[in-house]
Every structure is written in structure tokens, then in C-alpha cells.
Amino acid sequence: IKNITLHENIEYLGGGAFALTNAESAIIPKGITTTPGVIFYDSDTLKRVEFLGEITEIGSMAFCGCTNLTDVIFTGKVKSVGDRAFSNCSLFDSPIDLEDAVYIGEYAFQKCERLNLTAMPTKTCTFGEYAFYKSGLSGKLDIPESSKLYMHAFDECKGITEVILGENTVVNFGGQIFKNCTGLEKVTVCDGVELYSGDFDGCSNLTELHFKNTSSPVNGLGKINENATIFGYKNSNA
């Protein structure tokens, strides 16, 4: 079967429903509003999936290993992206809106080299281990206040140029959050954020660190550009 088209009355799909399929495309009816875990796991011939309903949740490993997947079409606001949901989908380049997301799982977009995000989370969000590891994430990254960043969340995202860490963001879950982000040039650290050694290891083009925190410690910055300038604020301990 090259093309999967389901009956319009279907409202439930179990996990792994089409794992390891040889299909090239699929159309999922509007009654499905969440993408089940491992639904298309390791389907390396799959190129395009269209969801006719409004998708709010993408399950763990939903498209993991779909190495030829380019398009996942859906409407709705995604609130959760499960662990390894798009891991190793190196050709995936459909626009995806994460504005309302509150959870992005570990390895969720690992090695999605053509990642095309139209919006990043604007609310408090948890970013799992290696969530965007070696992905095509680029430009300015504004982390919402009180978010949680786990180890290597943005490791080797070489297209990121600027980072703002919102107030009370927790970045000490293993460290090395932005390791080897070689395109990173500027970081702004807001109040209540505690940095750890290694969070910016290998950020060779980092030239500006702006600290707005007046009460949070900096436990070393690791191996960063030796010519970087640190901008402290009055009464801060940068």
C-alpha cells in the first residue's frame, strides 16, 4: 500500500498503528486530534502525512526514524511534543507552530536539520534532554520565564544567534544546554537564572553576555570565546 486513507468516521488510532509501514503517504481523518505514539515509527518510505483534524499532541516516537519524511500537515495548536517524536527526520521541513507548547520531550527534534518552526513556546515550557540536538533551529531564541531546560537541550544548534533566558528559568538539569552553538553571539540572562559551568562550552562566537540578575549565582561559564564581553548590571553579581 503506497497511500493510506482512513474512513472519515474513525476517532481513535492505537500506538504503532502504522509502524514500519511501506506507505509513502497517509491522510488521517479529522476525528483524530492527537498523534499516537510510534504511529509511523521507522517508516523510512513515508514522505507525507496529512491530519484533517486539529492536532494538540504529538506522541512519543510518532515519526521517529522516518528518514524520508518531508511533510506533516495539520491545523491546531500543539501543546505537547513527545520524546523522540521527530528524531532523525532529517528531511522534515513542514512549518510547525509551537507557540502554545508546554512540553517538548527529549530528543524530540534531534537531527531535524531542516526544522522550520514558525513559533517557539511563549509560555512556561519544559525542554527535555537533547530536545533540539543538531537541529536546524535558527535565529533568536526567547525562553519563557520559569521554563526548565534539561541537559544538552540545544546542543549543536549552530543556527541560533541570540538567546534570552527568561526570569526564573531553570537550566541546571545536567548542564551544557547550549554546547557547541557556534553561531551564538549574544546571551541575555534575566533575574533568577542560575548558570552552570559548561552551559556555553564551545560557543566560539559568543561575544556578549548580558546579566540582568541581581541575586542569581554564576557557577562558571565553561569554554567560551576568550574575547567575550560580560555586561553586568548595577547590584548584580555577574
Image (cartoon, rainbow, N blue to C red):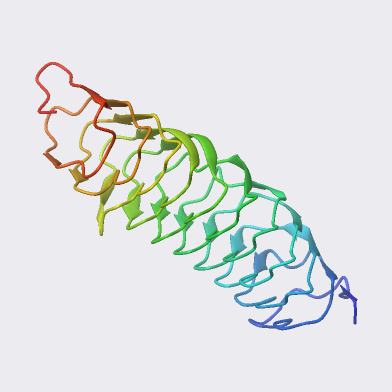
Residue furthest top in the image: 234
Q: Nearer the viewer, residue 5 or 161?
A: 161
Q: Quadrant of the N terminus?
A: bottom right
Above or below: residue 80 compared with residue 202: below
Q: In the picture provided, is 24 more to the left or to the right than 188?
A: right
Q: Quadrant of the C terminus?
A: top left
Q: Of 208 and 12, which appears nearest the observer?
A: 208
Question: Is 84 situated left or right of 194 in this image?
Answer: right
Residue 98 point in image, percent of width and height: 57, 47
Q: Position of residue 25 (x, y in %)?
A: 84, 69
Residue 226 sits above or below residue 150 on the image: above
Looking at the rendering, which quadrant does residue 67 occupy? bottom right
Task: Using the image, determine if residue 206 lies above or below residue 108.
Answer: above
Q: Report which quarter residue 10 is drawn in.
A: bottom right
With 124 as the anchor, is 57 left or right in this view? right
Q: Position of residue 129 (x, y in %)?
A: 38, 61
Which one is nearer the viewer's eye here, 182 or 60?
Answer: 182
Q: Position of residue 160 (x, y in %)?
A: 48, 38
User: What residue lies at 52% left-to-right and 60% top-to-bottom?
Assistant: 110
Residue drawn at point x = 84 percent, y = 71 percent: 24
Q: Quadrant of residue 71?
A: bottom right
Towards the viewer: 93 or 77: 93
Report how many numbered discs are placed on residues in the image.
0
